[in-house]
Image (tube, rainbow, N blue to C red):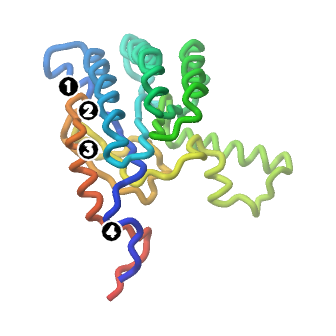
Amino acid sequence: MAAKDITGSVPAHVAIIMDGNGRWATSRGWPRLVGHRRGAERVRTIVEAAPGLGIRYLTLYAFSTENWKRSTEEVIGLMTIFARYIQSEAERLSAEGVRLRFIGERSRLDKKLQKLMAGIEERTKENDRLHLTVAINYGGRDELMRAARKVAEDVAAGRLTPDEVDEAAIEARLDTHDLPDPDLVIRTSGETRISNYLLWQSAYSEYEFTDTLWPDFTPAELEAIMARFTDRERRYGGAMTA
């Protein structure tokens, strides 16, 4: 049998598509934004639990490039929740050794939110206990398009030759250039699609889909999913041999 990669090991990098906030709220007769606020509270719970479960990198899908299609009220509400989360969690994240980074295209975001994002990134940049990455205005296709544009610009400027355009050249220009690829991608809410999330990075990730809505997703369920991960054999395209 071909050599196994990390069978029996916990996933060091877990990426989560946090889905189901709106449905969680509407099923209770509440506005969708109530679900998003509860979802932000769930982020705190999972972030607190992650290091104890052996997770070193946690990447969360908060707002996609497609989410601008939602109602103006919901988009504004979400941006307000993001800003409040950064303001309320800055001191705690810093004290607990969490490094917070953001991926996605920032230019469309409110200038004040951009400033808050840059501020907490700077404040926590030396932390290493947990690397928390939040995807805001992020889409995998958009990220690849931006990376391709940078490659084209570098080739046109003579900084890169066509023969030098390889996987490493692309990866160096991704938003996640300083992060390892995710070992495990989890999607909550019962949907079984990846929704334009980490398309390049998750090429060989393991996937788990759970019916649990994000506000109800607990550290115990995360631990159970991680336990199942340890039973998987990751061969990265290699074949089983006798």
| Of pointers 2 and 4, the one earlier in the residue sequence | 2
The answer to whether residue 154 is left or right of residue 6 is right
Mark 3 highlights which residue?
Answer: 222
| Of pointers 3 and 1, the one earlier in the residue sequence | 1
Q: Which mark is residue 214?
A: 2
Q: Residue at x 32, y 53 (%)?
A: 207
Q: Is residue 61 above or below residue 24?
A: below
Which marked residue is nearer to the observer: mark 3 or mark 2? Answer: 3
Q: CA distance from mark 2 to mark 4?
A: 27 Å
* Circles 2 and 4: CB atoms closer than 8 Å: no
Q: CA distance from mark 1 to mark 2?
A: 8 Å
SS for callout 1: helix
Q: Residue at x 28, y 50 (%)?
A: 208
Where does the C terminus fall, quadrant-wise? bottom left
Q: Depth check: give the residue in front, 110 or 146.
A: 110
Mark 1 highlights which residue?
Answer: 24
The crowd level at tag 4 (other Cα within 10 Å; few <14, some 14-19, many 20+) is some
The answer to whether residue 218 is left or right of residue 156 is left
The crowd level at tag 3 (other Cα within 10 Å; few <14, some 14-19, many 20+) is some
Q: Is residue 192 above or below residue 32?
A: below
Q: CA distance from mark 3 to mark 2?
A: 11 Å
Name which residue type carries label 1. Trp
SS for callout 2: helix
Name which residue type carries label 2. Trp
| Of pointers 3 and 2, the one earlier in the residue sequence | 2
Q: Position of residue 233 (x, y in %)?
A: 33, 68
Q: Is residue 48 above or below residue 41?
A: below
Q: Residue at x 85, y 46 (%)?
A: 157
Where does the N terminus fall, quadrant-wise? bottom left
Which marked residue is nearer to the observer: mark 4 or mark 1? Answer: 4
Name which residue type carries label 3. Leu
